[in-house]
Image (spheres, rainbow, N blue to C red):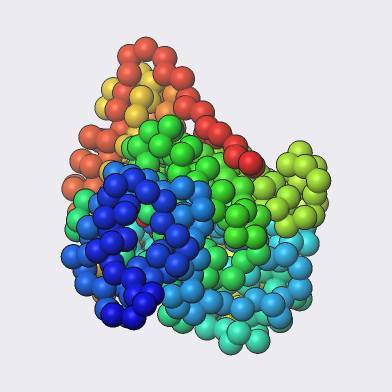
């Protein structure tokens, strides 16, 4: 053993006993775990020690940066200005990214978005955009940078070996009961965002049934942890906590969400989706240094919706990436489902719950999302909700429409009925934005 040799067992014991680890100890763990010299059993014991003993703000920032440096980091320096990225901890029918790209870009803030496909109720942002005929994300880094400099928004497919330490550690946590640890989740999410190259980050932390964090209290803790990490490592970061006790907007499905995004950019979108986009967009414009306050940023966003600039940027963006911009004025050019099946209310009352997760699964059963990496997505199918929590409903009113490419939707229908519950007494619509964290 060399004079300064570190041993993983000492680091585990130090954390187990509640002490603060040094930057070097955290790096030693991440480097060793990434290159395989530290085995899974020690990493899993370490994760459990962190789960019980927590980490200080300094340790959390060090862990994040060690994971960032475990792999490639995207260099966006060819793009002018402060590049802002938005991350959502995952929701159902979350159309915000489609809206926010062109909306924020229309105020002059560069949005250089790297996106994936992934598993879920619907496809990811790229799948949704591919519902537009011809749209593609195979840009070279030069094309990507040039497009953002020219029209302020571009989307490129994920590439490179980003944060391999996180990939390995997250998979290990998944099978060792150590996922739900604030320092581990916060460093995991932030490492991926930082490696993706943005200068500033806005986080939408979802709370509720359909979300990763089920209580507002936990969501606030996670959001604050991530904001602290970002700001500690020189990336201006803000966050909001938003409700996921029901799906966002009305559309859940790929082409359906593109249409919903167009309507929102026209100023005719669902109230909750519009409000969420304006709230997140205000933070994006502010962290990019284009406004002195959230209120001022919001005015800029409202203006580009009202004067048509946001919609115009969406058209330019579609055209620049090979898509047919005519869909913006004629959404019937998007993939259309063969069958539209109404879901009428069987009882009168007030909508009490719309279990977001289960409604998302109903859309997935139709083919809107991937159950496994190999699944094919049907871009045309999905659900349109017509009622939200708190709405008054009479027997026979349409709760939702199923957009399907097969006639037999019995299973989907049942899933919808059992996950939209009615109350005999009035129900208050849940607050959409639970908290705004700017630090
Ligand atoms: N999402 C992540 O990316 N990492 C976590 O640890 C939890 C959720
Ligand atoms: Ca939606």
**Residue 59 image point, x, y percent:** 46, 55
Q: Name the outermost residue toward the front.
A: 3
Residue 372 percent across, percent down from the top left: 25, 67
| Side of 92 relative to 314 (left or right) | left
In the picture, residue 146 is in which quadrant?
Answer: bottom right
Report whether 325 appears left or right of 424. Answer: right
Q: Position of residue 77 (x, y in %)?
A: 69, 77
Residue drawn at 35 percent across, 37 percent down: 214
Residue at position x 37%, y 41% in the image: 213
Ligand 1: quadrant of the figure: bottom left
Q: Which residue shows up at 46% across the image and 54% down it?
A: 60
Residue 176 shows in the view:
yes
Q: Residue furthest top?
A: 425
Give the camera-side residue of 18 and 225: 18
Q: Is residue 90 visible?
A: no
Towards the viewer: 12 or 113: 12
Up/down of 92 relative to 31, above or below: above
- Residue at 49%, 79% (x, y): give it: 72
In the depicted structure, whether residue 305 falls above or below residue 175: above
Labels in figure, total: 0
Q: Quadrant of the C terminus?
A: top right
Task: Tell me: residue 405, above or below residue 265.
Answer: below
In the picture, which quadrant includes the N terminus? bottom left
* Left or right, 367 with reference to 65: left
Looking at the picture, tell me which residue is in the foreground, 189 or 204: 189
Q: Residue 238: image x %, image y %?
A: 61, 48
Depth check, front residue: 205 or 261: 205
């Amino acid at each position: 053993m060399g004079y300064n040799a570190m041993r993983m067992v000492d680091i585990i014991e130090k954390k187990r006993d509640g002490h603060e680890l040094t930057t070097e100890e955290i790096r030693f763990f991440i480097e060793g775990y990434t290159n395989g010299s530290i085995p899974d059993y020690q990493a899993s014991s370490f994760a459990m020690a962190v789960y019980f003993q927590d980490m200080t703000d300094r340790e959390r920032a060090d862990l994040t940066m060690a994971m960032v440096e475990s792999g490639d980091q995207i260099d966006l320096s060819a793009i002018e200005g402060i590049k802002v990225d938005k991350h959502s901890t995952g929701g159902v029918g979350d159309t915000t990214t489609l809206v926010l790209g062109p909306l924020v870009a229309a105020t002059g803030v560069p949005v250089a978005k790297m996106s994936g496909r992934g598993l879920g109720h619907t496809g990811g942002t790229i799948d949704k955009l591919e519902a537009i005929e011809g749209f593609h994300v195979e840009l070279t880094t030069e094309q990507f940078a040039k497009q953002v400099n020219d029209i302020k928004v571009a989307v490129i497919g994920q590439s490179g070996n980003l944060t391999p330490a996180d990939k390995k550690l997250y998979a290990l946590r998944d099978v060792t009961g150590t996922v739900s640890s604030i320092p581990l989740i916060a460093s995991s999410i932030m490492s991926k965002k930082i490696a993706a190259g943005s200068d500033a980050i806005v986080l939408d932390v979802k709370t509720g049934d359909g979300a990763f964090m089920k209580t507002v209290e936990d969501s606030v803790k996670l959001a604050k942890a991530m904001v602290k990490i970002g700001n500690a490592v020189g990336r201006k970061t803000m966050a909001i906590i938003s409700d996921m006790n029901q799906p966002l907007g009305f559309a859940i499905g790929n082409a359906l969400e593109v249409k919903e995004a167009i309507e929102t950019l026209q100023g005719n979108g669902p109230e909750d989706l519009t409000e969420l986009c304006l709230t997140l967009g205000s933070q994006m414009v502010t962290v990019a240094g284009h406004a002195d306050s959230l209120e001022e940023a919001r005015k800029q966003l409202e203006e580009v919706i009202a004067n048509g600039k946001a919609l115009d940027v969406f058209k330019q963006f579609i055209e620049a990436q090979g898509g047919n911009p005519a869909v913006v004025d004629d959404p019937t050019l998007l993939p259309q489902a063969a069958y539209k099946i109404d879901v009428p209310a069987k009882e009168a009352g007030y909508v009490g719950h719309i279990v977001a997760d289960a409604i998302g699964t109903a859309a997935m059963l139709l083919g809107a999302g991937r159950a496994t990496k190999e699944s094919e997505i049907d871009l045309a199918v999905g659900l349109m909700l017509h009622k939200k929590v708190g709405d008054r409903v009479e027997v026979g009113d349409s709760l939702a429409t199923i957009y399907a490419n097969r006639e037999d939707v019995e299973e989907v229908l049942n899933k919808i009925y059992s996950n939209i519950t009615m109350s005999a007494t009035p129900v208050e619509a849940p607050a959409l934005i639970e908290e705004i964290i700017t630090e």
